[in-house]
Amino acid sequence: MERLEDLAVSTPERVKILKKARVTKLIKDDSGAVVGVEYEVKGKTDSAYGPVILATGGYAADFTEDSLLKKHRPEFWDLPTTNGEHCTGDGQKLAMAIGANAVDLEKVQVHPTGLVDPKEPEAKVKFLAAEALRGCGGLLLDNTGSRFVDELQHRDFVTGKIWENKKVRNIFQRECLYTKEFGSTLSDLFSMETLRKKSSGIASTTSAVG
């Protein structure tokens, strides 16, 4: 993207970047080939012609009634997502609206762990709690303080055990993980004082995190 931005400055006759523009339609010629897009920007509708590449991401952050997630995997529709807020399936919907075929839309992976922002616990978009957290010693606990899965198993296995457990689940990390390896990232969500909070044992830990 940085290279593209450089080209937009050095050769504006070749590269033009439109910010805050929303593509609303793919344009086809008489043969059925896609030759451009129709878009809206600053309240006006315009068109751009040339090769079209869709790079809009997935659709797991689409919580609308016509969500592709709701259509193909309705059991996941109410779950929060670690996808970006931009992943609302716009590209797929645009393509299918003009007759494109889609494959594997039902193949959705549920990541087992995410971080809950204490300021927005009900937010639908979460921050991913990567495997590295569990790989460095993170434990998955139920609401009794008991482990119920090998945290280092692959994602679908860990997620499956969480489904089977059907209890409140918490991730407990040793203090060193936050302060030495993940503090700079997680501090955007949590104060370092919160991350450094110590507990005398598993019971007090589960009590502290609910």
Image (cartoon, rainbow, N blue to C red):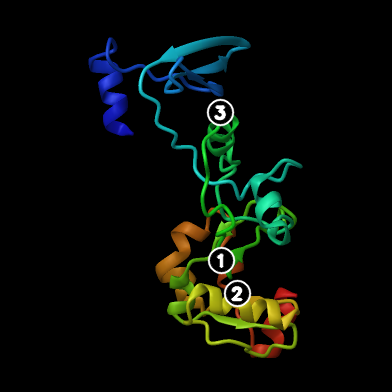
Q: Is residue 152 above or below residue 89?
A: below
- 15 vs 151: above or below: above
Label 2 sits on a secondary structure element that is helix
Distance (Cα) linking label 1 and label 2:
7 Å
- Which amino acid type is shown beneath numbered disc 1? His
Residue situated in front as seen by the camera: 12 or 164? 164
Circle 1 packing at 10 Å, graded few (<14), some (14-19), many (20+), is some
Seen in the image, is 158 located left or right of residue 142?
A: left
In the figure, is residue 34 to the left or right of 15? right
Q: Nearer the viewer, residue 55 or 162?
A: 55
Q: Residue at x 65, y 51 (%)?
A: 69
Residue at coordinates 74% horizontally, 83% vertically from top-left?
143
Image coords of residue 160 (percent x, y): 62, 77
Pointer 3 residue: 98
Residue position marked by numbered label 2 in the rendering: 159
Mark identifier at residue 111:
1
Q: Answer with mark 3 or mark 1, whichever residue precedes in sequence.
A: 3
Marks 2 and 3 sit apart, C-alpha to C-alpha, by 36 Å
What count of labels does the image hold? Answer: 3
Element type where label 3 sits in the image: loop
Q: Give coordinates of residue 117: x percent, y percent.
A: 65, 57
Proximity of marks 2 and 3: CB atoms separated by less than 8 Å = no
Please state which amino acid type lies under the numbered disc 2.
Thr
What amino acid type should be assigned to the residue bearing mark 3? Ile
Of residues 178 and 10, the one drawn nearer to the viewer in this rendering: 10
Q: Earlier in the sequence, mark 1 or mark 2?
A: 1
- Taking the view exactly as shown, the residue that stands out farthest to the front is 31
Q: Quadrant of residue 192?
A: bottom right
* Residue closest to the eye, 182 or 1: 1
> Which one is closest to the eye, mark 2 or mark 3?
3
